[in-house]
Image (tube, helix red, strand yellow):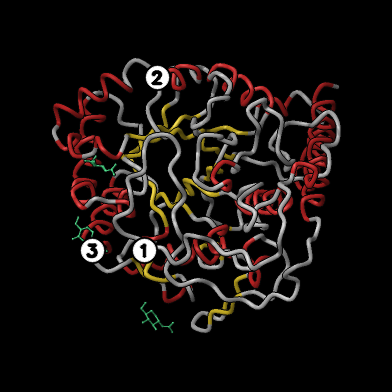
Amino acid sequence: MEIFSKHSSLHTHALILLLLLFPAVHSIGVNYGTLGDNLPPPSQVAHFLKSRTIIDRIRIFDVNHDIIKSFANSGILVSVTLPNGDIPSLTDPRNARRWIDANIRPFYPATKIHYICVGTEVLHWGPQKLIDNLVPAMKVLHAALVKEGFGDIKISTPHSLGILQSSDPPSNASFRPGWDVGSLAPMLEFLKETKSGFMVNPYTYFGYSPANANFCLFKPNAGLFDKATGITYTNQFDQLMDAVHVSMKKLGYPDVEIVVAETGWPSGGDPANVHANPVNAAAYIGGLMKKVNSGDGTPLMPGRKFETYIFALFNENLKGPSLDEKNFGLFRPDFTQVYNVGIEHAPLAPSPSPMADGPKSSAADAPKSRWKDAPFFNKTNSSSGSPAKAPPPASSTTTTDANVRASSPAATNANVVFAARSAAAIILAVALLV
Ligand SMILES: *[C@@H]1O[C@H](CO)[C@@H](O)[C@H](O)[C@H]1NC(C)=O
Ligand SMILES: *[C@@H]1O[C@H](CO)[C@@H](O)[C@H](O)[C@H]1NC(C)=O
Ligand SMILES: *[C@@H]1O[C@H](CO)[C@@H](O)[C@H](O)[C@H]1NC(C)=O
């Protein structure tokens, strides 16, 4: 890097030391859903993300032109989503070209369109007609993009982990029969050929039980032992990612990149869901960011990085029906952060105790995800805007966890780490200026 040559080796050493002490957050993405009647205009959102946060990529749940335009020349990558209902028509090359002319050509490359997601959780929500047309539509759209000169825009489609037959133990995971060879094998072949990522939406929130709380939240716990590999999993995120990896490997595609298209934890929820609170949300998102930026990968994918999109940017008051769905945001519509895990640059003052924002949850009855026993098939369609969250893989995790009810202030630790990181960034900036 040229800049170093202008400075003494002392500065270089200081820089290296700082980087070692505080590994920088390389990149984090966020899902920008718009199901709220009180959300700020896209131009303000683009300015806020660029000037005040470390977020360097967004994904939207439609092809909202106003949003795409607002991120022009922002340096922020934008991934867009083609509505599920449009999938069948996209298998016709003429329609694909028209779609590109309407939704991509006017905005690219001023806006760095990164991925086009062909639908959202299509296998999960169906109907069968969409599932049957999914891979053909991806191929036709890709061919049209290449032909029209937009070959570096990637095509993929996010999956709920309902695509897994089981995830426990990870070594025995596989995709659901039917979907495995019918849809996922040809899809993985396409993704491999086009150097695109396989997108999954792992939510440890929906795998939560009081007994495995710490396992879901990246907190110390006894872990999940996988006899076949001898690996002890210390968090459910790793478990789910390795379950996806094993399933891909069984089909012959272990090396296709995995993209975490959605993951999150709500800071509030229905009264029964006491685990939806800001302390847990901060623990999960803080742990997630540490994980994806550490470069450690997972036990079965050491050293691999996962492009990751947190769900979601804002609390969205028109989502539902549960309060949980309305409270996945990192920020409120007025841009104040719901909890502090260092996504916003150097906060001016320490943020108040996260609990201050918390929902007043009443009882301590065992919280239970209402998705837990839900069937995976033939749900109502997900509409444009951010989709409803999907259930976890078929087999739920059991771990022993001694500290179930202890509410540990992990969020505070995350704050300290990130505050230190901000301080390091300032010192670094000063060092480079002298
Ligand atoms: C689901 O999507 C299909 C195809 O777009 C549409 O025909 C159908 O009416 C939708 N069903 C619901 C319940 O929205
Ligand atoms: C592995 O998965 C299969 C099918 O999902 C299941 O029938 C079997 O019991 C599992 N084996 C172990 C050791 O968990
Ligand atoms: C889902 O719908 C398909 C038709 O689209 C039907 O064949 C299948 O039996 C349904 N599955 C369930 C679990 O209801």
Q: Earlier in the sequence, mark 2 or mark 3?
A: 2
Q: Is residue 344 above or below residue 300?
A: above
Say which mark, if any, is on residue 375. Answer: 1
**Residue 340 image position (x, y, % from top left):** 74, 40
Q: Residue at x 49, y 76 (%)?
A: 169
Q: Residue at x 63, y 54 (%)?
A: 291
Q: CA distance from mark 3 to mark 1?
A: 21 Å
Residue type, label 3: Val
- Local crowd size for mark 1, using a 10 Å CA cut-off: few (<14), some (14–19), many (≥20): few
**Residue 189 image position (x, y, % from top left):** 26, 53
Mark 1 or mark 2, which is nearer to you? 1
State yes or no: discs 2 and 3 in contact (Cβ < 8 Å).
Answer: no
- Which of 158 and 305 lies nearest the eye of the viewer? 158
Mark 2 or mark 3, which is nearer to you? 2
Q: Is residue 329 above or below residue 410?
A: above
CB of residue at label 1: within 8 Å of ligand 3?
Answer: yes
Mark 3 or mark 1, which is nearer to you? 1
Looking at the image, in which quadrant does ligand 1 appear? top left
Q: Earlier in the sequence, mark 3 or mark 1?
A: 3
Residue type, label 1: Pro
Quadrant of the rendered structure where residue 336 is?
top right
Q: CA distance from mark 1 to mark 2?
A: 35 Å
Left or right, 308 with reference to 380: right
Say which mark, if any, is on residue 33. Answer: none
Q: Kindly identify which residue carries mark 3.
A: 181
Say which mark, if any, is on residue 65. Answer: 2
Quadrant of the rendered structure where residue 428 is?
top right
Q: Residue at x 65, y 49 (%)?
A: 285
- Local crowd size for mark 2, using a 10 Å CA cut-off: few (<14), some (14–19), many (≥20): few
- Local crowd size for mark 3, using a 10 Å CA cut-off: few (<14), some (14–19), many (≥20): few
Q: CA distance from mark 2 to mark 3?
A: 36 Å
